[in-house]
Image (spheres, rainbow, N blue to C red):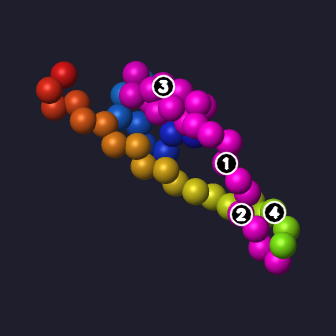
Amino acid sequence: MVVKSLQYDCDQAALTLIHYMPEWKPAIKSGKPVSVRYYLEIPFDYRNH
């Protein structure tokens, strides 16, 4: 999910990056996996493009 969009192409690049990341390990609480919300900031440097 894109929380704050820069533009469509950047959104798609960020989603592709996340898709190809290594598999994430779940958070653990009391020895059991739990759901958590995590925000991953992906900066773009577009000044020279």
Crowding near the residue tagged with mark 4, few <14, some 14–19, many ≥20 C-alpha atoms within 10 Å: few
Residue on which the image places disc 4: 33
Give the residue type at disc 1. Trp
Q: Nearer the viewer, residue 3 or 48?
A: 48
Label 4 and label 1: CA atoms lie apart by: 12 Å
Label 1 and label 2: CA atoms lie apart by: 9 Å
Residue on which the image places disc 3: 12
Identify the element where label 1 is drawn: loop
Give the residue type at disc 2. Ala
Image point (52%, 54%), residue name: 39
Numbered marks: total: 4
Q: Which quarter of the picture shows residue 34?
A: bottom right
Q: Nearer the viewer, residue 44 or 21?
A: 21
Disc on the earlier residue, 2 or 4: 2
Image point (40%, 22%), residue name: 9
Q: Is residue 40 left or right of residue 21?
A: left
Label 3 and label 1: CA atoms lie apart by: 20 Å
Q: Nearer the viewer, mark 3 or mark 2?
A: 2
Q: What's drawn in magenta, residue-wise?
A: 9-30
Residue on which the image places disc 2: 27
Q: Is residue 40 left or right of residue 35?
A: left
Identify the element where label 3 is drawn: helix
Q: Residue 48: x and y, percent? A: 14, 26
Q: Is residue 47 left or right of residue 17?
A: left
Q: Does the magenta run of residues contain 18?
A: yes
Q: Nearer the viewer, mark 4 or mark 3?
A: 4
Image point (76%, 68%), residue name: 28
